[in-house]
Structures are given as C-alpha cells and as structure tokens.
Amino acid sequence: MNKNFLALGLAAALLAPQVAGAEGFGINEWSAEGVAMGGARMFAEDDAANVAYNPASITKVKGEVMKSSYTYLSPHGNYKLYDGAGKEIEDGKNVVHAGWAVGSYYVRQINDKEWFGIGAFPRFAMVSEFERASKASTNAFFSKLNGVSVTPTYAHKFDKKWSAAVGAEINYVGLELQKNYYHPVAQMNVGATQTEGESYALGWNAAANYAFDDKNEIGVVYRSRITHSLEADFKMYPASGGKITADAYGVVTLPDSWDIGYNHKFDKKTRLELKATRTNWSTYDALNISLSNPSVPGVLPSNVDSAKNWENGWRYAIGLEHNLSDKYAVMAGFAFDEASIPYDGGDFIVPTGLRRTYSIGARYNDKKQTVAVALGWMDVGNLDFAGHATDAYKSAHAYDSFTKIASISYQRKF
C-alpha cells in the first residue's frame, strides 16, 4: 500500500500546474503546516515535509511516514501603461489563472543513526495571463513555468546535538511563453508567438542542524543552482494568416539559495521558528531565445533577447506553533520577501514587487494520521518597469496585487 501511495503522490506532483508563491518565481508552499507558519518550518517533529524544508530534520521522523500536500494559489493584480511622454495609454488587470503547488514526501528511519527520504515538490514555478488584445500582450499575454524537483536524501544523526543530510535534485521545467509580436518600425502587431519546451537538469543540496539544548536549535540548508539548456518549439501566427515554425534554444539558470533557521521551544506546547533565505536571483540575468531557422527575415528575428539583471534578495519568515492538546494544534506565520526585479528588468511574465504574507492554520493528529489546513494572504507590492523595444508601451506600473492561498496536507505513518 505504501508504494502505491508514494507513486500516486509523485505522479500528482509531476502533473499538477504550478504558480509562483514567492519573490521572483520561487515556491515555498510545500505543505499546509509550512504555509501556516510562513515557510518557517525547518525543525518540525515527525513531518515528512522536512525533506523539502530542511533535509537534516528528517532525523526527527520516527519509523516510516508518507505525506501529500496540495496548495491553491490565486493571483490578482492591476497595471497601467505609459507612453514615452509619461501619458497613460492603458489600464487593466491580469486574467485570474490560479494553480496548484503539490508536494509528495516519503521518509524512512533505517536505524538509530540513518534516515532516507525522497520528495517531489516545486521549487520554481509561475503562471501569469493578461488580455490578448491589450498592449501588455506585446510583452506577454500568457507565461507558464511548471517546475518539479525530485530529491532523494540521506540523513545521519551523529549525536544528540548534530545531524546532517545530503541529497540529489532532479529538476524538471516546462516553459511556455506567448506574446503578440510588436514590430517597432511598423508600430503594429504583426502576429502572435508561442515558445514551448521542457528540460531536465541535476542539482544537489546539503543541510545541517545543531541543538544547543532541549529548547534551542539552529540549522542551515544549501541548494545548488541548476542550469537548464532548453530546446523548444517556436510558432508564429502572422496577422495576415498562416503559421511560421522554428526551432528555439535558450539557457535558464535557476538560482542557488541558503536557508538559515532558528527554533526555540518555550515549553512542551509552544515553539517559535525564525528563518532567513538568501536567493541568488542574479543568475537570472537575461531571457534570450535563439531561433535556428526563422523563415521571414526582417519580420521574425533570429534572436529574441531580453535583459533581466535581477538582484540577489532575502526572504524573512517567522512561524509560531502551539499544541492545544495531544491531538490539536494551531499555527500562524508571517513572511517578507524583498523585491529583486530592477526597473529595466521587469516584465509581465513576473510582474511583482516586494511581498508580505500573513497565514494561519490548524492541525489534527493521532498515532497514525495527521491532517492540516492553512489559509494565507500575500500582499504583493507595486512594481514599476520599463518597456522593451518590441513592447507597445514605454513603462508600466503594476499595483494592488495580491494572492489568495489555501492548503491541505495529509500524512500517514506505517
């Protein structure tokens, strides 16, 4: 039964659509308990989702445990566009295109010193959509990055104070970009384009925990950068009719990151976690796509280049967990994401600024099963960014943006 449960969970994680849940296109919503605590969940007891949040903490799992998590995210937002003189030429909002962040986890205690774990969850993903007839569509009217990481992990507990883990990461991305191609000389849309491809690449992670005493613990997690060489299909549908096809190629480097966490137990019922995440978004310096066989010189370029030059940034989170009884617990959290997108590197693929996330949750558990639910509200800050040569505007302002979050997790012991 446990093998079928794991296979079903991994399949669900690989097939489900994903949306962004943190600054840039990073995801932190890996379980309902994690959502409830703002992502500050590096030291949970008996939680298979530790594979995602802190691999060194799978040493806190007793026996054999499996878990599945489903998080619903619904983004909303508005924008204004301006011409070269600063005059407003369009206002609009995104098309609500909600998605799911799905996680599946399995942890097994081998003996008193060794543990094995594996997870399938999204580290990077996003989706955004805007009206196809809008001027914003000349930058992007549909963008989607489906991402799943499969992370086999080995953890070792050296003594009562030290534990550590190391793991591989098999990372999948499926990228789809759609836009109206705006010819800067003719100053008109000459057709809609679609770029679609997928890639697999390898990375790794390492983690360590140190317990000062029964009440205080620190931990650190490093996740490597992952470079995808993406081969894609390019299609253009000219306004005059017909279809143009080409082979496309691009390189996307997903950033490396550091997590640093602190856990304090006030007593047997209440604990507090603090977490800081450093993500090296500077790896996203450009989104350049090369076309190997464009068939309309002068209309369809051989290279579609877009500078990004994102800045490295921090995410800070605080989470509180309180056990009401042996079976019931409540949780709350807050997270703050720094903005990493510069004025000349923004776009309608990821039109977000700094973010503040407020969340609450509850958990029920008995000797065999755990069920948790969480609700969150992500207040997305404003973002101003410049238009590019093939955009039908000179600058843009995204504002009044937010994301609704709802999550549920189920865990079973065997």
Image: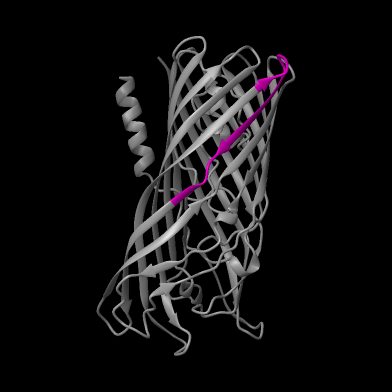
Numbered-mark total: 0
Q: Is residue 279 above or below residue 235?
A: above
Q: Where's the N terminus, which quadrant?
A: top left
Q: Position of residue 367 (x, y in %)?
A: 48, 12
Tell whether 4 sits left or right of 170.
Answer: left
Q: Position of residue 37 (x, y in %)?
A: 63, 34
Q: Position of residue 281 (x, y in %)?
A: 59, 53
Q: Position of residue 220 (x, y in %)?
A: 63, 31
Q: Residue furthest top?
A: 112
Name the residue located 44 percent from the left edge and 90 percent from the top edge.
186
Front residue of 328/53: it is 53
| Whether residue 391 is visible | yes
| Whether residue 67 is visible | no
Q: Is residue 129 above or below residue 58?
A: below
Residue stretch in magenta = 210-227
Q: Is residue 405 above or below residue 58?
A: below
Q: Main secondary structure of the magenta part?
A: strand
Is 221 magenta? The answer is yes
**Which of the 4 image quadrants contains residue 394?**
bottom right
Tell whether 69 sits left or right of 351.
Answer: left
Name the residue located 45 percent from the left edge and 70 percent from the top edge.
131
Q: Where's the C terminus, which quadrant?
A: top left
